[in-house]
Amino acid sequence: MDCKFDIQDLSVYWRGNLSLKKVSLKISSSQILGIIGPAGSGKTTFLRSLDRMNELEPGFKAEGRVLLDGEDIYGAGYDAVTLRKKVGMVFALPVALPMSVYENVVYGPRLAGIRNHDRLDELVEQSLTAAFMWNEVKDRLDMSGLRLSGGQQQRLCLARVLAMEPEVILLDEPCSGLDPISTAKIEEALTELKKKYTIILVTNNTKQAARIADQTAFFLMGELIEMGVTDRIFTAPVHKQTDDYVTGRFG
Amino acid sequence: MDKRHFDVELDQLRQKLVMMATKVEILINHSIEAIRKRDAAAAETALAMDKEIDRMEIEIEEAAISLIARYQPAAGDLRFLVGAIKINNDLERIGDHGVNIAQSAALLAGRPDVKVLADIPWMAGLAVSMLKDSLDSFISGDSEKAREVCTRDDQVDELKDQILRIVLTFMMEKPDFISSGMTLILVARNLERIADLATDISEEAIYIHHGKVIKHGAEQQPEASGQDVVS
């Protein structure tokens, strides 16, 4: 399987404090990588390092290399706009823009210069379909995105990312505030989407990683403790720390 | 930190399984003693004990399924619960074989003693020691002991074949012996199954404690693909 991301000895410092310690791993394309670990383990820092979102924060410093399709995204001259076109992100809290469902989806493509109405209509249908919500909203695309339920708003955010036609989707706790039905819809969507995209999912819900991730990585105190095929991580992990965490005994 | 409810319930299940294993061990020892002594009354006692074991099997199975449904365990806990369900089933079947042996003892009671019986206690001793060691390895996680049980299974199989040959020879020579011979073959067959099930328990013990699958001769480490990273 193709290697999408090749992370080599990535260390991250916040105001001089080391919060990610020499993490090295490879992420294959067309797979879901689940990232689990307790609060403060560095999983969100790691995720945000993959699209250089951390560098917007003061006091951030990164060492090591993050190769996306063989190119170091922290290398001199690597364009952040190009990076964010390739790598989309869905956050924990759904942030629907105060505009219609349709406008929410076409917001990014319009910024990227797409003006053709037919093309935009096509992107809206494609993205909402892929986010498993086209049938729910196709007759009310002009309704405000803010009137959707929490679960629908999160899928709208996913559709907004998909409309940019990225290659990688990063998700940071996308189901943290959602009910089981909405969570299941997001999970169904991700399972379908992995055929076309590389998906990296940070989750505090270990069962979610067990259900949908192909590979799972366990982080603890800024270190990658163990990464492997999800079945193995949840049935026979090598590290006792991993075992303690996935069985809920940690701490 | 106080134990979680899950851990308390898991401990209770473990204790119940150990209690069931002890009862099965007693039943098997009782049945084998009955064969040695040609005890006609042994079958009734064995049947009573088996009813108790059957009841425990249902309780343990229900408790394990309930724990899986309510807590969705993972890793070591999941291996223990799945292993417990299998061992529970193995123990129940061992109990049934014990009853069969006790019933054979009742059939053999009163029949003329024959030399061929000499190998049955030997085989029984081996099967019982395998059962004891498999249960010890389940409780302690001693993988060496568990592996050793698996190697002893071949000896039991050879003994069964040997007994079969001798009994068949006797049966051909003395038609009067056919009925007793058939009973002895049945006893040997039950002992062989007990040894097989003890082997299963040992294999489960290794999986529960170490996450390694060794059954069907296909020992494999936890899957370690090229993607694996272990610090």
Image: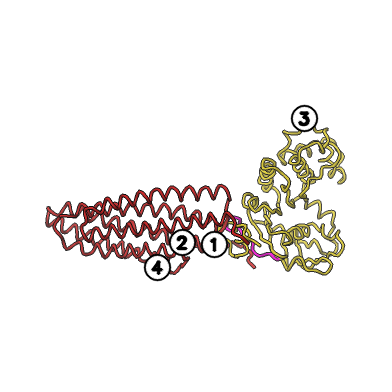
Chain colours: A yellow, B red
| Nearer the observer, B92 or A134 | B92
Q: Is residue A230 left or right of residue A111?
A: left
Which is nearer the N-term, disc 2 or disc 4?
4
Residue lying at the far front of the rendered structure: B2
In the rendering, at what x and y percent does residue B110 appear? 15, 55
- Amino acid identity at mark 4: Glu
The residue that disc 3 covers is A139
Q: Secondary structure at mark 1?
A: loop
Q: Is residue A31 left or right of residue A172?
A: left
Tell me which segment is drawn in magenta.
A223-232
The residue that disc 2 covers is B205
Circle 1 packing at 10 Å, graded few (<14), some (14-19), many (20+), is some
Circle 3 packing at 10 Å, graded few (<14), some (14-19), many (20+), is few
- Amino acid identity at mark 3: Asp
Q: In this rendering, which labeled residue sits more in front, label 2 or label 4?
A: 2
The residue that disc 1 covers is B222
Looking at the rendering, in which quadrant would you find the C terminus of chain B? bottom right
| Mark pair 1, 3: CA separation | 50 Å
Tag 2 subunit: B
| Camera sees residue A243 | yes
Residue drawn at (81%, 63%) of the image: A74
